[in-house]
Image (tube, rainbow, N blue to C red):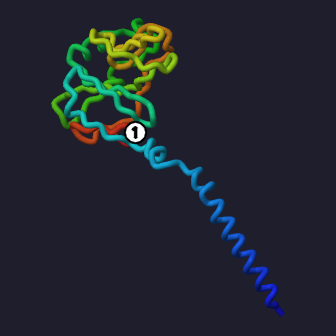
Amino acid sequence: MPTRRDFIYVATGMVGAVGAAAALWPFIDQMRPDADVRAAGLPIDVDLSAIEPGGTIIVTWRSNPYFVRHLTEEEIASASELTEGDMKDYAPVDGRIAAAEESANPEWVIVSATCTHLGCVPNTVDNAPEGWFCPCHGSVFDMTGRILRGPAPINLPLPPYVFADATTLVVGTDQA
């Protein structure tokens, strides 16, 4: 038969357990990632309507910068003229240029803005076929992000993206 003393022991143990849990909760809760970190991997929408042909913007997805460039007809022609012998890491130009289906034939390049040599951010060069120049060690990329010369071993990577409509690009999704 339980006695009054048994009840006091059980009640004291329960209060101690609840108190310990209440004291530990802030330490456990602080280990969760905050809202900025949880949102960092989500796709981002980019408004393309303000980018004129020849214009470039830099967007950030997953804490990495990406170039979004609206190519001119001259830049497309110049990039198409490059051959396998002109590049260190050959890639056909049609796999690196995207066209928005609903618009009047704009051409877009979406590539990583981080040099594949040491992680610097290349500068824009205004004369085609050279699109970006890494000032740290001299790597030169064409307008589509293909390595032409310098110590960078591979082309600038392409992020996953889709066109939601003629003026909206969604970076960070692999659904086509």
Residue 69 lies left or right of residue 43; in this view the side is left
Q: Residue furthest right?
A: 1
Give the quarter of the image for residue 164.
Answer: top left
Picture coordinates of residue 136 (x, y %)? Answer: 46, 11
Q: Residue 65: name its quadrant.
A: top left
Image point 22% across, 37% down: which residue? 167
Q: Nearer the viewer, residue 159 or 77?
A: 159
Q: Residue at the location (44% across, 25% down)?
A: 157
Q: Which residue matches tag 1? A: 172
Query: In which quadrant of the rendered image does the N terminus lie?
Result: bottom right
Residue 169 left/right relative to 19: left
Disc 1 marks a residue whose amino acid type is Gly
Residue depicted at 40% across the width and 24% down the height: 113
150 lies above or below 154: above
Which quadrant is home to the C terminus? top left
Q: Quadrant of residue 133?
A: top left
The residue positioned farthest toward the bottom in the image shown? 1
- In the image, taking residue 75 as reference, residue 137 lies left or right, namely right
Query: Which secondary structure lies at badge 1?
Result: loop
Q: Is residue 131 above or below residue 16?
A: above
Q: Residues within 10 Å of mark 1 (few under 14, many from 20)?
A: some
| Callout count | 1
Residue 47 percent coordinates (x, y): 25, 37
Above or below for 97 versus 132: below
> Residue 128: horizontal and vertical position, in percent?
28, 10
Using the image, determine if residue 10 lies above or below residue 167.
Answer: below
Asked whether, in this view, residue 167 is left or right of residue 18, the answer is left
